[in-house]
Structures are given as C-alpha cells and as structure tokens.
Amino acid sequence: GIFLVALSTLMYEILLTRIFSVTMGYHFAFMAVSLAMFGMTVGAIIVYIFPHKFPQAKINIILTRQALYFSIATLLSFLIHLFIPFIHGMSLLGMAVTAFTYAEISVPFVFSGICISLLLTRFPAQVNKLYAADLIGASLGCILVVVVLNVSGGPTGVFITALISAAAAYVFSRDSEIKSSMGKGIAVFTLVILVFSIFHTVLVQKHEPLLRLFWVRGEWSEKPLYEKWNSFSRVSIDGDSTKYETPFGWGLSNKYDRSRKIRQLMLNIDAHSTTVLSHFNGDTSELSHLKYDVSNLAQYLRPNGDIMIIGSGAGRDVLSSLAFGQKNILGIEINKDMISAINNDFGDFTGHLDKYPNVEFVGDEARSYIQRMDSARKFDIIQVSVIDNWSAAASGAFVLTENALYTKETWKLFLSRLKPNGILTVTRFYRAKPIEHYRLMNITADALQESGIKDIRSHVMLIKCQQQERLQDRSGTGTLLISNSPFSGNDIKMVDSLCKAFEFEDIVSPENTTDSVFAKLTSSDKRDELNRNFPLDITSPTDDKPFFFHYMNFTDLPNTQMWNMWDMGFNAKAIFILLTLAGTMSFLSLLCIIVPLKLTAKKIKLKGTSSFFIYFTGLGLGFMLIEISQIQRLNIFLGHPTFSLAAALFTMLLSSGIGSYFSGADKPGAAAKSKFRFIGLLITMIVFGLVTPYVIDMFSVSSTEIRILVSVLTLFPMGFFLGMAFPIGMKMAGEKAPGITPWLWGINGVMSVLATVLSIIIAMNYGISASYWTGAVCYIAAFAALLTFTKQKA
C-alpha cells in the first residue's frame, strides 16, 4: 500500500511541474514542488494534532479512505485547474487565482501525507521496512513518469496517477473490516480509471485527445496541430500550413522585403520558447530570407565548410546552412520529439531534411555529445542561435535554472572543436542594456585566455540587428563571432560591408568598439577591475554555478532604481518569487512547528525531546540539499534531463530505500549501532562530496551507458547510508515519546520543503558545491543530536 501511495505521489508531483510549466510558467512550476511537499506535511501535522481521529483499531479502514480520497482529489483538482485561466501580474485577482490554484492543487497531497504519516508512525516495529517501501515506490515513480509522459502525455498521466492511488486503496481494503460493497466500489472505480487511461492514451497517440491544456499562461489555447509530451518538455505545433506570412526571425534585416511571404508553422516548447517550421520543397531560392539574418553572418565568412548547429530545433539553422551551400551539416538537438516532428510528422512540409546526404541530426545534449565525439572531428562553424525566445528571456523564465551551454567550460569545449580559422557564432537578444552580451563576452575572454590567447579583441566581433518594429525599446539581436585565430583583414572588411548592406550595427570588432564596457571586457588589464565594480554580476558562469540568466545580487532587490536602469525587471521578478517562496515556506514551517506544540502541550509529554527536533530538522534539510546538489552535478555529466530523472533521482531514492530496509531499526540494539552507521554516513558523504567532481571529469567522454553506471555507483553508497538515518531516529523517538512521531515526520517534511528553495538560493549565490556542503553540515548537526538522545537513553 505505501509503495503505491509513494509511487503515485512522486509521479503526480513531477507531472505537476510539467503541466504548470505550460499553464503558468516555470517559476510557478518550481513553487508547485514545494507546495506539494508542504501538503504532505500538513497531512502529517493533522495526524499529530488529532490522533483520536485516527484510532489504531480502524487504521486499515482509515488508510483505505485516505488513499481513495487522494485518488479522487487528484482528478478533481486537476480538472479544476484545466478550466481556470491563470492570471499574470500582481493584481488582487491574479494573486487570488494563484492562491486558489495552489490551495486546491495541494489538497491531494494532504491525503497522501495523512496516509504515509500513519504508516510510518503507527507501526514502529516495521518503520524501516515501510520507509524502504516508501522510497522504493518513489524511485520507481521516477521511471514510470518518464514512460507515462512519453506514451500518454501530461493530462492522461494524471489519470494514471489517480489509478495507482486507487489501487493502493483497494490493497488497503483487502486487509480491513471495510464493507464488501465499498471494496467492490473501489475496484469498479479503479477499473473505470484504467479503461479511460487506456482509451485516452490511444487518442493521444492519434493527436486527438479529449483532455488537453485549454488555458496556456492565461490565454485560451486552440487545439494544436501536433502535441507531444516528454519528461522535460511539451512540444506543440500550431498554424495554417497553406498560409503565406512574413518570415519569422528575430535577427531579420530591415532590408529584407517584407512583402515576400513564406509558408511556416509555429513550434512551441512549454509555451515559452518559440521557433518555426519553414516550408521547403528543395529549392534553396525559397530560403533567401535566411541570408538576411544576422545569426548567419558566419556563413558568409566560412562558406562551403563543416558546420555544427547547437539546438537545431525546428530546422531553421539547418535550412540556413543549405541556403549557404555548406558542405556538411550536423544538427544536435536535445529534444528528440522535435527531430521526429519536423522529419516525420511534418516531413512533407519541411522537406525531409534528414534525407539530405550532407545533413545529420543527432538527438542528444550538445555538450555531452561533443565531449564523446571523435576529437579529430573539427568544424568551420559552430552555431548557437537563440536557444530560447524573447518572451521567455524577458519573463525571467530561466533565471532559476542551470544552463550547461553558457559556461566557461562549455565555451572552451566549443573552441577546441573548431578548425584553426573556425568560428563560434552565438546569437542572443541584445537589450538596450546588453547585460547578456556583457556576460557572453566575459565567458569568451575567460575561455580564450585559458587557451593561451591574450589579445582578446582581435579574436571577437559583435554585430547587432535593430529591427524597425523594435526601435522604441531599443532591443534587438546580437551575434557574437569568436575564433581561435585572429580575424583577418578580409573577414573584417566583409563584416563591415555586410553591416552596411543589411543595416546591421558593428558593436565590437578588432579595430573598434562603440561600447566602453565591451572595450574593457576585451582588455586583459581592465576586465577584472570592471567585473569587481560593475553593479551587476556579469562574470562567467561555471559548471559549479551555471546560472547564466542570473545577474542581480539578492540584496539589490529593494533597489528598484538600479534594476530599472539596467532592465533587470525579469531578474528581479524571479528573485522576488524565490524569496517570497522562501519567506512563505519559513513562516509555514514555523507554524507547523509551533501550532501543533501549542495545541498538544498538555496532552503529550515533550520534555527531553528537543534533540529529536534537531535530528529530524537536520535530516529534512540535509537530505534534500545533498540530493538536489548531486543531481545538479550529474545533470551536465549525464547530458540529458531524462537521464538525470530516471537514473540519478531513481538511484538516490532506491538506494535510500534499501538502506532503510537494512538499517536494523527493527532489531534489538539499534540505538547502540546507530552511531556507527551514522559515522559511516558522514564518511561516505565527505568522500563522495570530494571525489564526485573528479569522477565526473574522468568519465565525461565515456559512453552513455558508462556514464549512467558511474552515476549509479557515485550515488548508491551515499543514498544507502542516508536511508538509514530516518528509521533509526523514528524508532528511538517512538520508544521515548511515541505521541510526537507524526509531528517529527512533519518536521522532516517541512524542512525538506524549505531545502528545495534553499538549495537554489545557495547554488545561485555560492555554487552547487556550497549547497552540497551545507547539507553535510545539517547531517553533522543531526549526528550531534543523535549522540545526545542515545546518551539520554543510556
């Protein structure tokens, strides 16, 4: 029973992050994780405050009902969410809708929390086995949710989650004195959900679902031509394939004749990033508009060459390479569903680009693939063109996310794959205050200097496209050209003539720059001083601190004049949401600690239990900080979000479950042995914390199978020991003060909620390693508490 409840709980939590990312935006999806966990904590607190509502004699009946309520509430809350539009902004209505959404979405997790809390606190003799089943169920949820999203999609996945929790209710009912009629009712309810899930999965495969996301980021969404979910995105394609439109392009020159229309379809990823599928019948003259795009300047400089495209997306850059007659074209795209959509489902429209002998598509994470590529393979051009879009960047959708592409280490890798005169071309949005390009230039300067190049200016050029329709906000698109060799006089002259022909602006060249900040960034003796004194953080992101889109210090949030001056509203919004969440979680955490104590102080003996409070606080904070930081470390190493979810998180939870099972908490003498097990945990934590970065570096060029194996071997020993700590503490608490065990489980849960937010705050400001070692300190504090209550017991 607990296995199924935990499995469905984790599945629903992950599904919500995917669904909320589309319906509300990434920030709110991030908050959903914390509030879902908080809902479970509320369930545990309810068990603690109202123990008389959950008599031991009727425990199986209660478990049956709570699991059934979890299933029903999952369906109802999701259906309500489908039909309520999300309202952006800080209006009263917007805040009310957001509050209501979180309240109704958290209800299912309250029932899940009650169920799991009862199981872990009412059967102390079996707590290690029950906790093991809980974690192992959650670990399998990591695998199953990947399969469900790929096969059935997000909305159907919610029904499958409800199906599993209904099955848990049926399992509990078999061991209870519940009426046979209710047991049969649960069986029928489960069967109905099963039939609907299968039926709807078939419809999803035919792109004819009954249930879909009707409201996307506050706007009514018409049924897309194509929709495909996976574990890290939702790809949709919209538009009229027969309609002629002005070519899509953030960097399209003003000199292009807008009356020359083309056929195109819009492809959206999570309703954030937008790109286009362009119609192509094999006639490259149909692609003339691509020669007017600033992102393709490098193709004028290095024609008839080998080009590697990072994030080939819907194929626009591949078409550009065909239009310029490049010899060999390699497109790397992390989202295999996009490759399948453009070459299979819409292949007749796009021209089946994968059928061209000089075009190769690879479905992989670019950095990981390049590291494993034959080192002798070099390119004339490596192109990185606007991996996300303006609305996503402007909304701050990626401020809280790591990005492995925009780090110093990745830049060095890209440069190492260029031919002697090859060019790395990077296109991003050029704001009135070009913060992104300042940071890009810093990354470039660091990468070149660490490669032995001192004269940065002669190796870089920056060109801006300012479209007429965006003159008012002075924003545009900027393309940064980088080469290991100094740009030749012919290169400089050609870029100058192209700028004049297309009305592009030459911002930085080996001969001059129009921006004093860029002048200092490309000067070896002035760059460090600029970085120290600059009001924003424009230093190079690294693998340990890979937050490219985060520029503001948290302390600058009240300084509205500063972030308005630098167009940092998007960054301020993300920080505000994160700090608001941290403040809210801290306040709710205090409520979960103080209110239950006040309500039960006269009923339950609390003297001498403070060490248990410290112990479970340390476990809750420490486990999540270590888990999240290790997964962040391995995310780049594994090279794909699916691997990170299916391998890293699965291993961490599974090994913790196995560790719980073998913790010995159900055997005599557990207290005496607990100190030695905890010492083993601390030693393992310190050793793997130190060696993991070196292991990652050592095996970074290995095959996917080897990297997954290395990740498992890196995580399993630590997870094994981490899993022992909770059942040992719960066993001891149950012996000294059994009445407080639900409260302690709630404390563990609420601290886990807080840790999910703290891990991001720490990593953004001090790095992923700092987050890991903060978790280690929490476990050291827990160990000190363990020594205290084992001494008291003795």
Image (tube, grey):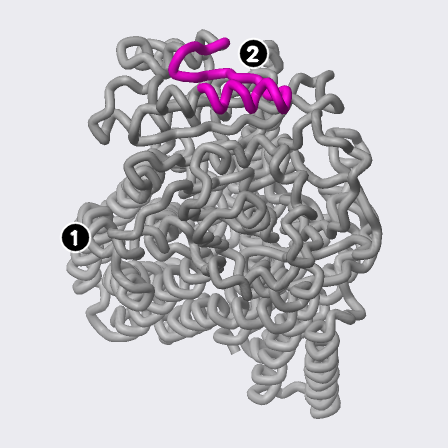
Q: Residue at x 57, y 30 (%)?
A: 294
Which of these two is toward me, 109 or 689?
A: 689
Q: Amino acid at mark 2?
A: Met
Q: Position of residue 671 (x, y in %)?
A: 22, 63
Residue 684: name its quadrant: bottom left
Q: Is residue 499 magenta?
A: yes
Q: Amino acid at mark 1?
A: Ile
Q: Dot 2 surroundings within 10 Å: few (below 14), some, or many (20 or more)? A: some
Q: Residue at x 61, y 53 (%)?
A: 314
The residue mark sitting in front, 2 or 1, is 2
**Residue that carries the numbered disc 2 in the rendered image:** 562
Q: Dot 1 surroundings within 10 Å: few (below 14), some, or many (20 or more)? A: some
Q: Is residue 660 above or below residue 500?
A: below
Q: Position of residue 128 (x, y in %)?
A: 35, 71
Can residue 455 be seen in this snapshot? yes
Can residue 74 be seen in this snapshot? no
Magenta-tinted stretch: 493-514
Q: Position of residue 370 (x, y in %)?
A: 34, 51
Residue 40: name its quadrant: bottom right
- Number of numbered labels in the structure image: 2
Q: Which secondary structure, mark 2?
A: helix
Q: Which secondary structure, mark 1?
A: helix
Numbered label attached to residue 683: 1
Q: Tell me the distance, in whole angstroms, between the alpha carbons under discs 2 and 1.
A: 46 Å
Which of these two is toward me, 120 or 285?
A: 285
Residue 344: name its quadrant: bottom right
